[in-house]
Image (tube, rainbow, N blue to C red):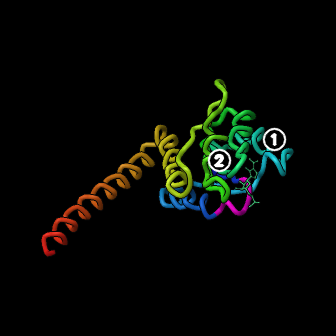
Amino acid sequence: MSAQVAVIMGSKSDWETMSHACVVLEELGIPYEKQVVSAHRTPDLMFEFAENAARRGLKVIIAGAGGAAHLPGMVAAKTLLPVIGVPVKSKALKGLDSLLSIVQMPGGIPVATVAIGKAGATNAGLLAAQMLGAFDPELAGRLQERRDRQRDAVLASSSELVLETEKQ
Ligand SMILES: Nc1c(C(=O)O)ncn1[C@@H]1O[C@H](COP(=O)(O)O)[C@@H](O)[C@H]1O
């Protein structure tokens, strides 16, 4: 099956963060592709990627970038596919610059922005899966199982907490 989700990032240095989106897609059995593409450093490639994304069969784009993070917004401007923006933690401003660059889009060109860093990238993978799951009952079932496992792990951790603190 051809890739349904593209995970793109402004630099290879973003991979440590963006890999967490890919882990979720793999876990849920969603075909995806990954690529470094930058609005600043490879603008022509970025345009070409965004213009052809829907035609290639992609359904959702996850775009991560740090600092002056224009990649998600610029990709969103060139495609009608939903774009999920992941603010990558920057050295200078801890990702606040990335977050504001991605989230403060002008009305008319939406980017679904998640939290800074690893948790945001994980949620980007889940959000993409949920978008696809709205049209794919089997995938929705796998998402529900994941939620159920998560709930059970929290309940188990609560019981552990009670037992451990009672011993003290
Ligand atoms: N924000 C952007 C864009 C873009 O938005 O097009 N291209 C690269 N970058 C970001 O620059 C940071 C530093 O990149 P390097 O580590 O390559 O110097 C990365 O977080 C990348 O996402």
SS at badge 1: helix
Specify the farthest residue to the right: 44
Q: Position of residue 137 (x, y in %)?
A: 42, 43
User: Which residue matches tag 2?
Assistant: 98
- Is 43 situated left or right of 136 in this image? right
Q: Please say whether residue 14 is one of the residues in the magenta stretch.
A: yes
Badge 2 amino acid: Ser
Q: Main secondary structure of the magenta part?
A: helix
Badge 1 amino acid: Phe
Residue 2 appears in the picture as rendered:
no
Residue 75 falls in image quadrant: top right
- Is 41 situated left or right of 99 in this image? right
Q: Number of callouts in the render? A: 2
Residue 51 falls in image quadrant: top right
Q: Which residues are magenta?
A: 10-15
**If the image is split into quadrants, where does the C terminus sit?**
bottom left
Give above or below for 163 relative to 68. below
Q: Position of residue 97 (x, y in %)?
A: 65, 46
Q: Position of residue 35 (x, y in %)?
A: 72, 56
Q: Under 8 Å from ligand 1: the CB of mark 2? A: yes
Tag 1 or tag 2, which sits nearer the N-term?
A: 1
User: Which residue matches tag 1?
Assistant: 47
- Is 139 situated left or right of 87 in this image? left
**As rendered, which of 59 and 18 lies closer to the eye?**
18
